[in-house]
Amino acid sequence: MAKGLDVGTMNILSAQQDGNDTVFVQQRNSFVEIGYSDMAEQMLARSEVLHIRKDDKVYVVGDDALNFANIFNKETRRPMKHGILSNDEQSAIPMMKLISTQEASSPL
């Protein structure tokens, strides 16, 4: 079964063969950092929001990052800049791994 992954600065796009059809899934290549709380963690898990916890921070990634940035009045961050991993962003590699793993594993 053929699969493909296109990692861009703005979006990550995956493709997978499903019989004679090709299924495409697009995810925004961005994330937002919010403070950790048990309530936030439970809400994100129940809502199936793509996120990861690291120490006292929670990182919401993909399309949901923009929504959460608006709710918490924060800016989204991007793991890539000018088509390559951003050297200004310490979280670039873990965020890319999380977003691309989600894209490659489960077309919506």
Image (tube, rainbow, N blue to C red):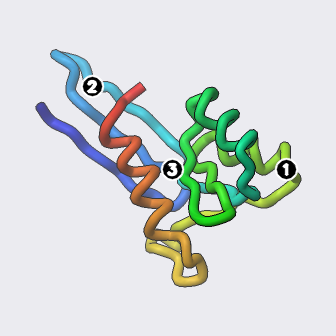
**Crowd class of label 3 (few under 14; some 14 to 19; many from 20; radius 10 Å):** some
Residue 73 horizontal side relative to residue 78, left or right: right
* Front residue of 12 and 104: 104
Indicate left or right for 33 with 70 as reference.
Answer: left
For the residues marked 3 and 1, what is the alpha-carbon distance in whole angstroms? 22 Å
Q: To which residue does mark 2 refer?
A: 22
Mark 2: secondary structure = strand
The kind of residue on which mark 2 rests is Thr
- Residue at coordinates 16% horizontally, 16% vertically from top-left? 19
Mark 1 surroundings: few (<14), some (14-19) or many (≥20) residues within 10 A: few
Relative to residue 92, is residue 59 depicted above or below?
above
Q: Is residue 71 above or below residue 93?
A: above
Tell me what residue is drawn at x 11 percent, y 31 percent: 1
Give residue 76's position: percent from left, percent from top: 71, 58
Q: Name the residue at 54% across, 52% down.
A: 52
Element under label 3? strand
Query: Could you tell me the amino acid type at mark 1?
Result: Phe
Asked which secondary structure carries label 1, the reply is loop
Circle 2 packing at 10 Å, graded few (<14), some (14-19), many (20+), is few
Residue 33 is tagged as none
Mark 2–mark 3 Cα distance, whole angstroms, equals: 18 Å
Residue to which mark 3 is pinned: 11
Tell me which amino acid carries mark 3: Asn
- Name the spot of residue 2 as percent of width and height, x first: 15, 36
Residue holding disc 1: 72
Q: Position of residue 89 (x, y in %)?
A: 58, 76
